[in-house]
Image (cartoon, helix red, strand yellow):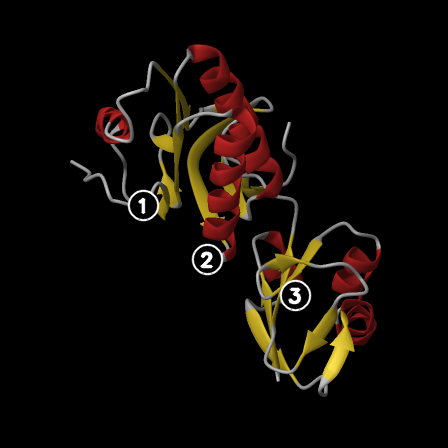
Amino acid sequence: MVTLKYFASLKSIAGKEQERLDLGNETTVQKLSETLAKTAPQIGEMIQGKKIIVSVNQDVATLDTVIHDGDEVAFLPPFSGGSQ
Amino acid sequence: MSTVMESKVRIQREDFSVTDEIEAIKKSSANIGGIVVFLGTGRELSKGENITKLNFEHYPKMAEKKLEELRVKAIDDYKIIDMSIIHRIGEIDIGENIVLIVAAGEHRKEAFAACEWAIAELKRTTPIWKRETTSKGEVWVQDTP
């Protein structure tokens, strides 16, 4: 099982903060985005269009990054910490 | 009154004391000759709208990791002696402290440069998000000017 986490504005778009998906032993961010596009088209589109950052086990990932069973994948909208 | 913790990188709900943090970094080395501080605070006006409340959320573990990477890089690249970075999360009122960066160097020049780089890099690379509440409702801020 892979844990998916949604942050900030993505929580309301996904309608959840977290979910667990069985993606087999090994997949990629690209394949995960295709899977998500079926149930959450907006999220899938944002990953493909690089509108959001995807991290795997707290490291910034690319579409080619491999996801293993037990990994934590997070979807991160543009950051806005600090102050202006 | 907040207490100064051992860690040089912290994400916390409670407020911090700028004075305490400066005193703490002074203990890093007797060679410190210049300390530059950036303090970010909650501003009332944003894009013409009056903000009543701010709320910060972070990705635990990843945000701390990014801040530590940033601190190490600042020390290495700018040849400063030490740096501490503190960011608050949760609900923050107008005028309250949000973020503190303390850069300590032998001389002021590298401390100024490191501090300016660090706040820009924090905004670019650290998974922290701001939600503003105005009379029109709540909105997640997604641009980092």
Q: Give the residue type that dot 2 points to.
A: Pro
Mark 2, residue position: B60
Is B103 above or below relative to A12? above
Q: Which mark is residue B135?
A: none
Mark 2 is surrounded, within 10 Å at the Cα level, by few (under 14), some (14 to 19) or many (20 or more) other residues, namely few
In this picture, is B44 found above or below A33?
above
Q: Is residue B64 left or right of residue A63?
A: left
Label annotation for residue A14:
3
Q: Residue at x 56, y 26 (%)?
A: B117
What residue is shown with label 1? B7
Q: Amino acid at mark 1?
A: Ser
- Rendering coords of residue A25 (x, y %): 71, 87
Q: Say which element carries label 3.
A: helix
Q: Give the residue furthest to the left.
A: B1
Mark nearer the viewer, 2 or 1: 1
State the residue in front, A49 or B140: A49
Circle 3 or circle 1, nearest the eye: 1
Nearer to me, A45 or B79: B79
Alpha carbon distance from label 3 to label 1: 35 Å
Label 2 secondary element: loop
Quarter of the image containing the N terminus of chain A? Answer: bottom right
Q: Chain of mark 1?
A: B
> Gap between marks 3 and 2, in whole Å?
20 Å
Q: Quadrant of the rendered structure where residue B88 is? A: top left
x then y, percent, for residue A55: 65, 60
- Decide: is A2 above or below A49: below
Using the numbered discs, state the Cα–Cα distance from disc 2 to disc 1 in whole angstroms: 16 Å
Label 1 sits on a secondary structure element that is loop
* The one of B8 and A17 positioned closer to us in this rendering: B8
